[in-house]
Amino acid sequence: MEIWDGHCHLSGYAGTPDERVGKLVALADRMGVDRLCIFMGANFHYDPTPEEMRAANDEVLDGLRNWHHHAFGFVYLNPNHLDASLAEFARCVEQGPMVAIKLWVAQHCDSPDVDAIVTRAAAAKAPIFQHTWQKITGNLPGESTAEELARLAARHPEATFICGHAGGDWENGIRAIRPHANVYADLGGGDPTAGFTEMAVRELGAERVIFGSDIPGRSYASQLAKVYGAQITEEAKRLIFSENLKRLLTPILKLKGVPVY
């Protein structure tokens, strides 16, 4: 099956950004993964300054320069620095090659501070990948839950969201995003727990589930197993592995003149 990985990072490898992406691509080739979506730089910052945010995006841009046939970039933004984030969106997406947005843990995603970013993203047909998690030990100060993403999605039905990690506590996360057709569940990260993918397909429909690995923080073997080993149809596996993400990215790729096969 064709496989598009919607959740990749540059961290975990040594070398230049180009060398890091090359190592990711070599691993993906060995595991049968065709396309990678890469975001954030080699060093993660919970609440990046405008300078740190720009540096992280520069690393991804540098890494993509020789790998456009294998990888796409998502721009990393911080709603706590709204003007700088909108400037980065213009530089990297509207005027650059990136195709989506990554929001992490700087600010709860249902904050009004996020609305301007979502409005710009929707106009550019750029999906928004929002990290979500629900920890029994307590979340980071700005870390979002799937419930918060559901509230944001309800305010912006014109935008498209990917719920990173399906909320971490995926049984609650899947239920939280279920009413919102503009929110898709990312399977990336965590262990290949029995029933995860089956529940996502049952509750959301296979058309709203997206494969992601969270590589190199997780192994391809463990993450691919979530789909290959799931008790779902072959058509559902095809949708999850590539067709859903391809469908979400096709509008912005067409605007950029990038052919989608």
Image: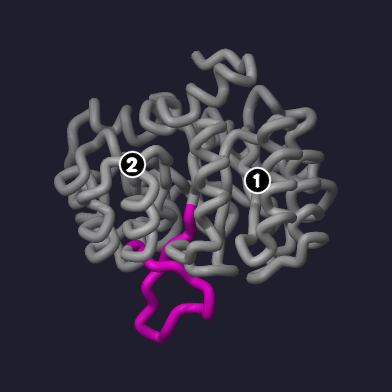
**Residue 187 visible in the current orientation:** no
Label 2 residue SS: loop
Q: Nearer the viewer, residue 130 or 94?
A: 94
Q: Is residue 147 left or right of residue 202?
A: right
Kindly identify which residue carries mark 1: 75
Residue at 39% over, 38% down: 158
**Quick one: quadrant of the N terminus?**
top left
| Place of residue 84 in the rendered image (x, y in percent of width and height, measured from the top left) | 74, 55
Q: Which residues are magenta?
A: 130-146
Residue 108 position (above or below residue 139): above
* For marks 2 and 1 on the same chain, the one whose residue lies earlier in the sequence: 1
Q: Quadrant of residue 97?
A: top right
99 to the left or right of 41: left
Asked whether 138 falls inside the magenta stretch, the response is yes
How many labels sit on residues? 2
User: x and y percent of residue 151 in the render?
Assistant: 34, 59
Left or right of residue 117, residue 76 in this image = right
- Which residue is more in the foreground, 46 or 95? 95
The secondary structure that dominates the magenta segment is: loop
Separation of residues labelled 2 and 1 (CA atoms): 20 Å
Dot 1 falls on a residue whose secondary structure is strand
How many residues crowd around disc 2 within 10 Å: few (fewer than 14), some, or many (20 or more)?
Answer: some
Residue drawn at x 27%, y 54% is: 177
* Residue with the mark numbered 2: 182
